[in-house]
Amino acid sequence: MARRRSRSCRGDARRGRGSPALTRTGGGIRQDVRRGNRPRKPPLRRGDYGQRVGTDEATPIRRLRGGIPMSISPQLIKSLRDETGAGFMDCKNALEQAGGDLEKARLILREKGAIIASKRASKEVNQGVIAGKLSEDGRTGALIDLRCETDFVARNEEFQNLAAELLEHVLAVGEEGKMDALLQRPSLTDSSITVEKQIEIAIGKTGERIVFQGYAVARVPEGENGVVDIYIHHNKLVGVMVVLTGSADKETMQNLAHEIAIQIAWSAPQYLSKEEIPAEALQQELEIEKQRALNEGKPENVAENIARGRVNKGFVQKVALLEQPFYKDESKTIGDMLKAAGSDLKVARFVRMEVGAP
C-alpha cells in the first residue's frame, strides 16, 4: 500500500519549498523546475573554452566578467600598487593599456594625474592641513599649508603622506618665498619627477584638486641664542611658528615660546607691536571711534580722548601681539610676560597659517 505524504509536505511542494516535485515522462523522471528551484548555471572559470562563431576552433576565455585578463597577473597589479599607491582598478587599467609593461603603466598613471588636475583646476579648496616640523638642532622650523576639496581627502593617508613629504622638502631646502622654484625641484622621494609632478600624482590617486597653498621657513639668527617653537592645533587647520631670542636658559625660552604660539593661534594678531601698525590704519580707527563718541553726544575734546582709549583697548590689542592680554592671565600682556622672563627676550618672528584663510 502506497504511503501517503502528510498534508504539510504536500503544501511545501506546492509552494516550492522542500524537495522539488518529480514528474514522470515518457523517457524517465525529470525535475519539475519551479520559481526558486531553477538550476544555476556553473560559473565560468579561468581556462574554460568557448566556441568561436563560424569556425570549429575552441577559444580560451580571455576575460572573466569583473575579472582580470589572463596576461595581467595579480602579482603585477600588486607590484604597481606598491610602487605608485594608486587604486586597484587604476593599476589594472593602466597595465592593460600598457600591455603589461610596468614602466609604461607608471607613465599612464602620471598622465592620468595631470588630466584630473587640469579638469579640477576650478574647484575650491577649503579643506586641508597645516603641518610643521623642527630641524634636529631646533634652530630652524618649517610650516606648510596644503589644501584639498573635502575633509575626507584631508584625512586620507595619501594626502597626509604628501603633506609630510612636502614638509621634509621645505625643511631640507630652507628657502622661503620661492614657490615656483620649489615646485620644479626634484622630489625627495623620487628624483625622476618634480615636486609639482608629485602633487599631480597625488591628485590622480585622490581624484581631488590639491593645492600647495604656501610655506614658511624660520630660523634663529646666526650667532644668537634662541629657540623656534611650532604649535599645530588639534584639528590641523591652524599652525603657528615662533622664533624667540634672548639670553634666558633654553627651557624657559621654549616654554614661553610655546605659550606665545598658542596665544597667536587663537588671537590671530597681524603685527608684533603697536609701532608696526600702519599710521593710516590707526588714523582710520581713531576717526571711526571719534565719530561714534560724537554721535553719543560727547564734546569734541572729550570725544578725542574716548577715541584714543577705545582704539588702544580694542583695535591695538586685537592686532598687535605684544599688546594682547595673556590668555592664561589677562592682567598681563605678552609684552609683560617677555620682560618677566628676561629683559632682553624678544619675539624675533612669528608666522600663523590657517586652512581657509586667504
Image (tube, rainbow, N blue to C red):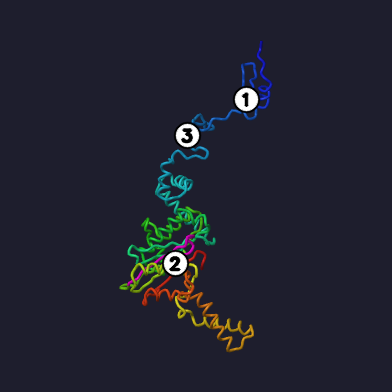
- Report the mark closest to the observer, 2 or 1: 2
Residue toward you, 147 or 282: 282
Q: For mark 1, does the 10 Å Cα neighbourhood hold few (<14), some (14 to 19), or many (20 or more) residues? A: few
Q: Is residue 283 left or right of residue 339?
A: right
Query: Looking at the picture, how far across and down is residue 133, in whole percent?
Result: 39, 62
Q: Is residue 106 magenta?
A: no
Q: Main secondary structure of the magenta part?
A: strand
> What amino acid type should be assigned to the residue bearing mark 3?
Arg
Pick whichever of labels 3 and 1 is earlier in the sequence: 1
- Report the mark closest to the observer, 3 or 1: 1
Q: Is residue 275 above or below residue 178?
A: below
Query: Looking at the picture, how far across and down is residue 164, in whole percent?
Result: 41, 58
The residue that appears at 64% across and 23% down in the rendered structure is 32
Tell me the tag on residue 240.
2
Dividing the picture into quadrants, the one containing residue 243 is bottom left
SS label for mark 2: strand
Pick whichever of labels 2 and 3 is earlier in the sequence: 3
Q: CA distance from mark 3 to mark 1?
A: 34 Å
> What amino acid type should be assigned to the residue bearing mark 2?
Val
| Label 2 close to label 3 by CB (< 8 Å) | no
Magenta region: 225-239
> What amino acid type should be assigned to the residue bearing mark 1?
Gly
Q: For mark 2, does the 10 Å Cα neighbourhood hold few (<14), some (14 to 19), or many (20 or more) residues? A: many
Tell me the tag on residue 214.
none
Dot 3 corresponds to which residue? 46
SS label for mark 3: loop
Pick whichever of labels 2 and 1 is earlier in the sequence: 1
Residue toward you, 130 or 89: 130
Query: Looking at the picture, how far across and down is residue 197, in whole percent?
Result: 43, 58
Dot 1 corresponds to which residue? 18
